[in-house]
Image: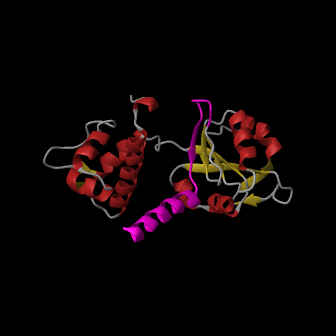
């Protein structure tokens, strides 16, 4: 079994892309695909594809390629997507409300069990069956249910939620706030993602494209 520290982050990112592409292929009822074609659809060369998939196992057949269904199954298992995960939300922003109402997350095995806020007007709300609690009740909720991951969508004071989640031993945090967090503990994994980060990278690309 591959340990987290043995798997390069860039490889992990590509494996996630492969899974997404395979999911789309399965929806189109494509049963098998060559390594060259799969690599093309994933934006890599076939040598890179085979090297990345070697972390998952020996799954291809020479001269035939890959079974879409089989490769997807093994990738999901390797990436932990064959499990159901319990999530909590930090900060009831418009993005947070959208995520609580998103049925696609449940289809993919991610279930919001509770949401937290510090504003009185939001506490007690129920969105898509998910109750909004005062952040001070986090200890009570984490004792009542098993929490696997937290998602921070607060825009004004995200550090309050980050500190609370880390204090309560939530080891996987998706941070969608404008402020990035970098945990000191190696036992906590934070994924920082912001639309403004991505848009800034694109603005840099366009700026240099116009100057070239």
Residue 74 falls left or right of residue 47: right
Report the residue that reaches farthest toward the front. Answer: 211
Rendered image coloring scheme: secondary structure
Q: How many marks?
A: 0
Does residue 34 appear in the picture of this structure? no
- Residue at 71% x, 54% y: name it: 154
Rendered location of residue 22, percent (x, y): 34, 54
Q: What's drawn in magenta, residue-wise?
A: 183-212
- Picture quarter containing residue 168? top right
Rendered location of residue 36, percent (x, y): 21, 53
- Residue at 79% x, 38% y: name it: 140
143 part of magenta stretch: no
Quadrant in the picture for the C terminus: bottom left
- Residue at 27% x, 40% y: name it: 51
186 part of magenta stretch: yes
Rendered location of residue 23, percent (x, y): 38, 56
- Picture quarter containing residue 187? top right
Nearer the observer, 157 or 59: 157
Residue 177 falls left or right of residue 135: left
């Amino acid at each position: 079994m591959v340990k987290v520290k043995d798997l390069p982050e860039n490889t992990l990112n590509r494996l996630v892309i492969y899974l997404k592409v395979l999911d789309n292929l399965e929806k189109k009822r494509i049963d098998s695909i060559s390594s060259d074609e799969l690599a093309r659809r994933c934006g890599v060369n076939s040598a890179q594809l085979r090297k990345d998939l070697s972390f998952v196992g020996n799954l291809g057949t020479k001269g035939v390629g890959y079974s879409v269904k089989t490769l997807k199954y093994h990738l999901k298992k390797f990436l932990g997507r064959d499990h159901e995960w319990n999530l909590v939300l930090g900060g009831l922003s418009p993005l947070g409300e959208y995520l609580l109402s998103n049925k696609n997350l449940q289809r993919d095995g991610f279930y919001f069990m509770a949401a937290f806020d510090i504003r009185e007007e939001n506490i007690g709300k129920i969105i898509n069956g998910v109750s909004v609690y005062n952040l001070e009740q986090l200890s009570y909720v984490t004792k009542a249910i098993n929490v696997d991951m937290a998602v921070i969508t607060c825009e004004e004071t995200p550090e309050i939620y980050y500190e609370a989640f880390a204090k309560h031993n939530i080891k996987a945090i998706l941070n969608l706030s404008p402020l990035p967090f970098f945990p000191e503990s190696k036992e906590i994994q934070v994924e920082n993602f912001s639309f403004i980060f991505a848009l800034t990278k694109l603005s840099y690309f366009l700026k240099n494209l116009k100057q070239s």
